[in-house]
Amino acid sequence: MTTTTIGVDIGGTKIAAALVGAGGELRGPVLRAPTPAAEGPVAVLHAAADLARRAAAAGRDDRGEAPVACGVGTAGAVDADGRITHATGSLPGWRGTDVRTALEAALGLPVTVHNDVHAMAVAEARRGAAATARDALVVAAGTGIGGAVITSGALVRGRHGLAGSIGHLPATVRTGRPCGCGGTDHVESYAAGPAIAALYAQRAGLAAVPALEEVAAADRPEASEAIALAARVLGAGLAAAATLLDPDVVVLGGGVLGLGEPFVAAVAEAMRAAAALPGPAGVPLRVAAFGPAAVLTGAALLAT
Ligand SMILES: [Zn+2]
């Protein structure tokens, strides 16, 4: 007998859901809806439950199997009870929300809740770029920078659900740039997508901060400098984490991959250059194998 699970991805701008099989394969379409973040947590939970129900119905049409559980990956840090312990401004009021209890009541199914990057890492570890690895460090660099540690094939959650938060390690350069957490000069301050775009805009004297794609396409030295600095800071952060964890592989995903293969190569080179010990210096850096369904797939796998 196979089991199917509903996977749900709650992000700051959109929610995605799909029915997922026991091996992590999609059993139906990935449905998406905007996150009603400004309306508060109750509206977000309502939208997530509604999308989960629709995804279950759409997937059931294909195979006739009812889901046995629901796995949620969400922005923010999540404790073992499925409650949000920390959240950024992308989901106002999200901190303190008991996601598990609310969705169990709404769906009538057991629900497990994890941080979105933790969920993504499980998808990569079971079926993606870290599938052959025993120990892996998985990093998602996009609007923010999150990370996850897989050891002996299992996710390290951490007491506050914050294990692997590489974005908030100190950066190797100190120029007083703000971080999404309220601190300054963290890895995220230089290597997150908006940070790269902001640095480019500042150096090029632009009135508005452009999208990351425009930075990638800009034929200006200020753009190359901002991207090179991001690669250097991220590479050094990965080297520090790899020195601590000595993983089999480091997996990089997220929106910064839109900067292309030269960026990934520059991060890998910076990681090698910054690693103090020969083993971690040689750890392979792989690009994430999963696309936009990574979080909901990993969340579903964590629910069974
Ligand atoms: Zn920070």
Image (tube, rainbow, N blue to C red):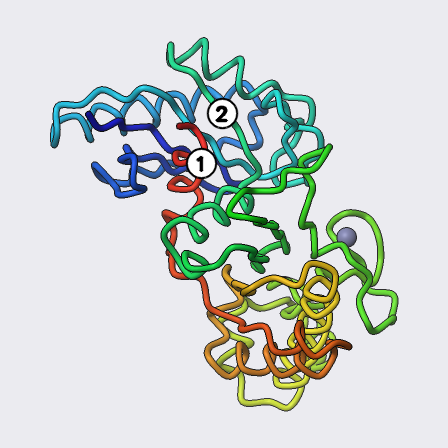
Q: Please name the residue that numbered disc 2 is placed on.
A: 112
Label 2: few (<14), some (14–19) or many (≥20) C-alpha neighbours in 10 Å: many
Quadrant position of the C terminus in the picture? top left
User: Residue placed at 49% from the left, 22% from the top?
Assistant: 45
Please state which of residues 125 and 185 is positioned toward the viewer in this rendering: 125
Q: Which residue is drawn at 52% across and 63% down?
A: 251
Q: Does the residue labelled 1 lie within 8 Å of ligand 1?
A: no
Q: What is the number of the mark on residue 113?
A: none
Q: Is mark 2 on a helix, strand or loop?
A: strand
Mark 1, residue position = 299
Depth check: give the residue in front, 4 or 77. 4
Residue at 30% in and 21% down: 53
Q: Which of 18/11 is in front?
A: 18
Tell me where residue 97 appears, x and y as whole percent.
63, 21
| Residue 30, quarter of the rendered image | top left
- Give the amino acid at mark 2: Thr
- Kindly check if marks 1 and 2 are in contact, taking CB atoms under 8 A apart as contact: yes
Q: Which of marks 1 and 2 is nearer the N terminus?
A: 2
Is ligand 1 less than 8 Å from the beta carbon at label 2?
Answer: no
**Along the line of sight, which residue is nearer the eye, 85 or 14?**
85
Q: In which quarter of the image is the N terminus?
A: top left
Position of residue 119 measured from the top left corner of the image (x, y, whole percent): 49, 42
Q: How far apart are marks 1 and 2 (CA)?
A: 8 Å
Vertical order, 125 against 53 (above or below): below
Q: In this view, does 246 lie to the left or right of 69?
A: right
Q: Where is residue 281 in the image (x, y as percent from the top left)?
A: 66, 77
Pointer 1 local density, CA inside 10 Å: few below 14, some 14–19, many at least 20: many
The residue at 40%/48% (across/down) is 126
Q: Where is residue 283 in the image (x, y as percent from the top left)?
A: 59, 72
Amino acid at circle 1: Ala
